[in-house]
Image (cartoon, grey):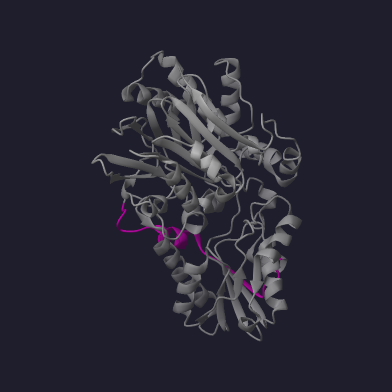
Amino acid sequence: MCGVVGIAAHSEVNQMLYDALTMLQHRGQDAAGIVTCQDGRLFLRKENGMVRDVFMTRHMMRLVGNQGIGHVRYPTAGTSSSAEAQPFYVNSPYGITLAHNGNLTNAEEIAKELFMEDMRHINTDSDSEVLLNVLAHEMQKLGIQHPSPDDIFEAMTSVYKRIEGAYAVVAMITGYGILAFRDPNGIRPLIFGQRLAENGGFEYLVASESVALTALGFDIVRDVKPGEAIFIDENNNFFSRQCVEAKEFRPCIFEYVYFARPDSIIDNISVYKARMRMGESLAQKIIKEWGEDHGIDVVIPIPDTSRTSAMELAQHLGVKYREGFMKNRYIGRTFIMPGQQQRKKSVRQKLNPVELEFKDKNVLLVDDSIVRGTTCNEIIQMARDAGAKKVFFASAAPMVKYPNVYGIDMPAKDELIASNRNVEEIREIIGADRLIFQDLEDLKQAVRTHKVPHLTEFDCSVFDGVYVAGGIDEAYLNDLEQKRNDFAKKGKDGYIDVNIDAASVDLTGVKES
């Protein structure tokens, strides 16, 4: 899971890219990067850390040019090394930079092809570097010194034939313009907008979420279609083409559950309204299973993503809604952290209970989802320590039973608490007095809307084990688990960064002839 942005403007884009990445910071707090282009030269800054920490005034001053792309990252495939911060750069042909959200499911196979057949060297474990080199190779095969938009789309058709999985990509071809494209199933989100510049011309912004557009004063045009590529040239002329036939449209349902900001609109569906409906259907299930006399005194969300669902749930139950946990916003997310002990420690640092809201009450804690269960266990214990009589727990999402291969870092089945366990077993492990999960069909119904009648199914692979892209089988999942479980991550991240500057990358003025 990452956030990407690309901007083509009539003025300097450095500040706009910075602001857009800040709006997408929730999608990745591990690393950030920006690359701009001016007069055939690229200017790059990328580093591990939050946007505000990576870009100082001196870096921003060097990021000159009217076109650029940016990225915020969580490590999924690969490692959390600064060497794998994006955007990635390849000098031939033309000089191409790329930022990617998602996972390629055939990255290993393609990496071998790139080395053996295309004679290209891959320097990291990142599938994004693989994707960049596929794009570069297909562009090079054209053998055209000055490619037109049609030439670029032709190369993209070949790229689509080679790669599998989930991807939303922004790339910049030095001296030519910005390219953006989305996987044929539309699993990962990508949206673009435009605005009128002071000189009367149009400026374009493409990003992972609509909030990046609206915050910068861009009007939403539409989502990039599955299998579509868009291109904005140096003069801000806009081109698009359906480069491959769209497959079954399956946007990731976890975007609506957790990843996206509630004020985002993804594929014409309001995330906020979807989460409200999740709370509604969960309330109905509580009444059905626990009865009208459910014994709940107060509903408390686990900040931040469950707030919208919890509010609506409380209203439908006719129970008080209270903010019982205060959040320290300077602690990163915990479910992605490798190692149970690290996650446990972080939860205690991140949340502080308001004892007044717990003392002598039957409390229903509402979370967006339960992944590993470690944080739930800690939070329930915190509620008991704060004086709660009974602690009930509700998940706005169904049980997460299967690994995710499309850009979320939960690849190991054994690390998922709901894997091969029933509700009662999970309840015992996390220490709740009662536990309830959303039904999958109710979740789908919560996200569906009459405004988008053709969108009826979603990528729900973490809940139902149905993988729509990439030919995923048991052997693939086992291999993935060996490479990306907690133990493997710990081993990988123990290596020293193989980077020219072992801490950060500043690439200033790389000119393509």
Horizontal side, residue 453 vs residue 411: left or right: left
Q: Quick check: 480 above or below 114?
A: below
Q: Nearer the viewer, residue 24 or 46?
A: 46
Quadrant of residue 186 in the image? top left
Quadrant of residue 513 in the image? top left
Q: Quick check: 22 above or below 513?
A: below
Horizontal side, residue 322 vs residue 154: left or right: right
Identify the residue shown where x is 37% and y is 24%. Answer: 152
Quadrant of residue 103 in the image? top right
Q: Which portion, as a residue range, is magenta?
A: 430-453
Is residue 398 highlighted in magenta? no
Q: Percent position (x, y) of residue 369? A: 57, 61
Residue placed furthest toward the top: 143
| Residue 288 makes an appearance in the image | yes
Q: Nearer the viewer, residue 378 or 174?
A: 174
Q: Percent position (x, y) of residue 336? A: 64, 51
Q: Nearer the viewer, residue 303 or 70?
A: 70
Identify the residue shown where x is 64% and y is 55%. Answer: 335
